[in-house]
Image (cartoon, helix red, strand yellow):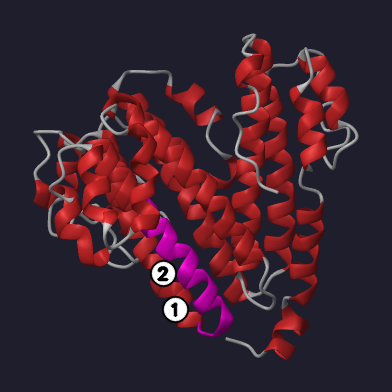
Amino acid sequence: MRSALNYNVHEGNLEAMVHGYKNGFIKPEEYNNLTQCDSLGDLKSQLQVTDYGNFLQNEAVLTSRIISERAVEKLCGEFREIRGWCDKSLGKFLDFITYDYMISNVLKLIAGARHARDSLDILYKCHPLGLFDGIAALTAATTVEEMYETVLIDSPIGPFFALGGAAQRDMDELSIEYIRGVLQKNYLEAFYDFVLSLGGETAEVMGRVLSFEADRLVISVAANTAGMKDLMPEDRKKLFPNFGTLVDVHEELCSVTSSEQIGERLKNTFPEFAELFEDSRGIDASSSKSVEKKLATRAVEVYRDAMSVQFQYGVFYGWIKLKEVEVSNLVWISECITQSMKHRVHEYVAIS
C-alpha cells in the first residue's frame, strides 16, 4: 500500500470527489420535508433543492420505480467517473464492489429462469453496476449449469460458484437462497483476502468493514434458515465465511432451530449481536425482518466509520454503500406515499 504522500498524489483527488458526494447526502431536515409530501409531484419538488436537483425533470409520469432508476443512474454516473480516473489498484478494489451487484443480477436471472418469467424484463431491471459481458446470453439458459458453462465460468464472478468440491450442476438442486449464501460467502472471502494484500490503512479499515459484512451474513443465514429441517447443520455452515468476529461460534450457530436460540448462543460472548434478537423473541415469522432492519442500521455506522479515515479505500466502499441506502430510502418514502401508508413513512434507515 502506498504511503500517505503517494496516496494523496494518486488517489487524493478521487477521495476528495467522494467526500464531495458525501456532502450531497440527503440531510435530516430534507428527509423531514420528503416525509411530509402528499404526492410524488411534491416529492419531486422537494428533491430539486437537494443534491439530486432536476434528475426527474424529463419524467412526465412518476412512479417509485422511475425515481429508483433515476437515482441509481446518478449513482452509477458518479461511480463510473471515479472508476475512469483511478489506477490499477483502486480499480480492482472498485471492481470488487461491482461483483456484489453482479451476484444479485445473476440470482434474479436464475430465479426468473426457474419460474418461467420474462427474462428480458428481468435483464432490464438488473442493476447497471452489475452488468458484465455476456450477461444478456444468460436469458437463453434454463438451468444454473447451463448458465455457468456458457457464460459465468468466464465472468468476474465465476470463481464464486465453487461449492467446495461439488459440481456446478448441483446448483440446480439448491434453493435460490442457498446459492445466494454460497456466492456471498465466496465473494466476501475473496474481497477480504484482496484488501489484506493491500496492507496499510486500507487493510485495517476494510478488514473491519468486511468482518462486519461476514458477521452480518452469518446472522442473516442463521436467522433465515433456523428451523429448516431440510437444511443440515453442516450445509448451513458452508455458507459462513471463514473470517469475522463470529468465527468461533459458527459450530453453535449452524445448529440453531429458532431465532431465540441465536440470541441465547450469542448472549455471553457477543452481547452486541444478541441484542438484535431481544425485541422479537418467540415471533420467528417476523423476527428475521426485524433483525435485518437492525443490521442495516448498524451497517450505516460501519460505513460512516469507514469514510472517516483518510488515505484508504474504505472511503469509496462506505460512500457507495451509504448511497445505496439513500436510494432505498427514497423508494421507501415514495412507496409509502403512493400506497397511502404515511404512518410508516419514517421507517427508513437514517444515514446521518
Amino acid tagged 1? Leu
x, y (%) of residue 209? 49, 64
- Residue in the foreground of this view, choosing between 13 and 329: 329
Report the number of numbered marks: 2
Q: Is residue 332 left or right of residue 132?
A: right
Tell whether position 83 is magenta.
Answer: no
Q: Which residue is the site of mark 1?
A: 196
Q: Are marks 2 and 1 in contact (CB under 8 Å)?
A: yes
Amino acid tagged 2? Tyr
Please name the residue shown 44% across and 73% down the image.
Answer: 194
Please name the residue shown 73% across and 48% down the image.
Answer: 77
Please name the residue shown 73% across and 80% down the image.
Answer: 10
Q: What is the span of residues highlighted in magenta in the rendered image?
A: 199-216
Q: Is residue 275 visible?
A: yes
Tell whether position 212 is magenta.
Answer: yes
Picture layout, residue 248 above or below residue 12: above
Q: Secondary structure at mark 1?
A: helix
Q: Is residue 310 left or right of residue 289?
A: right
x, y (%) of residue 303? 59, 58
Secondary structure that dominates the magenta span:
helix
Q: Is residue 35 left or right of residue 123?
A: right
Which class describes the residues within 10 Å of circle 2: few (<14), some (14-19), or many (20+)?
many
Q: Which residue is the site of mark 2?
A: 192
Quadrant hosting residue 333: top right
Q: Secondary structure at mark 2?
A: helix
Q: CA distance from mark 2 to mark 1?
A: 6 Å
x, y (%) of residue 325? 61, 42
Quadrant hosting residue 171: top left
